[in-house]
Amino acid sequence: MQNSPLLEMHHARSARIASTPAGDTLLTYGDVPGEYEAATKGALLFDETARGLIHVTGSDAKDFLHRLLTNHVKSLPSGNEAAPGLGNANLLLTGKGKIAEQFHLAQDGKGGYLLSTEPGRALPLMTALDMYLFVDDVQLTDQSQTHAPLSIVGPDAQGIVEQCLGLAVPSDAAPYTPLFGALAGESVRVTPMSRAGCDGFLLESSPAQVAELWDALLAAGAKTGGLAIHDILRVEACVGKFGVDVDDSIYPQEARLEPAFSLDKGCYIGQEVVAKIDTYGGLNKRLMLLRVDHDNPVAAGTRLERFDEKRDAWRDLGVVTSWGYSFAIDGGCVLAYIKRRHQDVGTEFRLGELPDGEDNRETARIVDLPRE
């Protein structure tokens, strides 16, 4: 696990730093409302340099990944080193169809693949993939130390990227289309993709170059964002985070991860379960956004209850996984997995027993996503 190479710079600039299970990370520079305004009306910059990276190479790399991963590999349009083909959001599932790892896949233009993971997940993903290697000509290399991505979101993000990197982003550029710009003569890979539930770009440069790129983007008009605003934005968009809202107890459809799996690519690990859910339904729960009737943080693990008049008892019907203050809704919100038949907008729950055993009798109500 690695900390951001920009962490020392954030400390020196008086940022607030948070300790997380994945290591120390930027929390905020102290203006969360301004950061929200930048994300929705300007451009907001995130430090994602602690992400992991696995390079998959070898003559069997394409076939190997295609038969394991949930999304297309073989049918992705390919390119060359100067213009690699499309990538996508992807998952590795357990044999029971639940989420073992979440990442995005890119082509390196030379027949290999780059798997960019959440911080601290490169080694677990590489270990999981290695379990399926027998006689395949496939090499798995942890290149996390060379991976220093930033992301930028917001309506002004494209203009800032183009200005800083001398790049014209095509109006029809699809998500996960790799583009290339340059800063001070060094190449920067630019990939359109959603970050924290917002349209934006992932910018990949070297660890030696990333501080210069960071400052160039700030000078062009971007504002710095950290974990605090990242959580607010993704909660508003009902986007789960791996290791927080998403783990190996969750099916992809429960976590709203439909863009990360295919129903037409053929067999892969867990495919039968995913297909059966799509064909016959049967999801027991789904990630939902709820407005809470107070602004205090709600602990992950808090239960959600409704009174069942037929049983004359309170029923446990959901569990909170994330909390954030929504500027769009102007109040506290939570992400929670809610059982089927209780997922209509307006459905109200009581916040039940907390993880530490204390009672909480506030309420939460399912709401529409405010930024759709």
Image: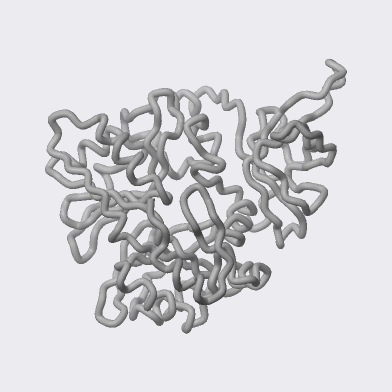
Asked whether, in this view, residue 93 is left or right of residue 143, the answer is right
* Residue 245 x/y as whole percent: 56, 41
Image quarter where the C terminus lies is bottom right
Identified at 69% across, 43% down, the residue is: 299
Identified at 36% across, 71% down, the residue is: 210
* Residue 349 x/y as whole percent: 79, 35
Q: Residue furthest top?
A: 311
Asked whether, in this view, residue 279 is left or right of residue 72, the answer is right
* Residue 188 x/y as whole percent: 31, 70
When the figure is inspected, residue 327 is found, relative to residue 210, above or below; the finding is above
Report which quarter residue 175 is drawn in.
Answer: bottom left
Identified at 38% across, 49% down, the residue is: 117
How many labels, in total?
Answer: 0
Residue 164 shows in this picture: yes
Asked whether, in this view, residue 255 is left or right of residue 69, the answer is right
Q: Nearer the viewer, residue 105 or 79?
A: 105
Report which quarter residue 74 is drawn in.
Answer: top left
* Residue 308 x/y as whole percent: 83, 22
When the figure is inspected, residue 188 is found, relative to residue 71, above or below; the finding is below
Q: Nearer the viewer, residue 75 or 251?
A: 251
Residue 192 shows in this picture: no
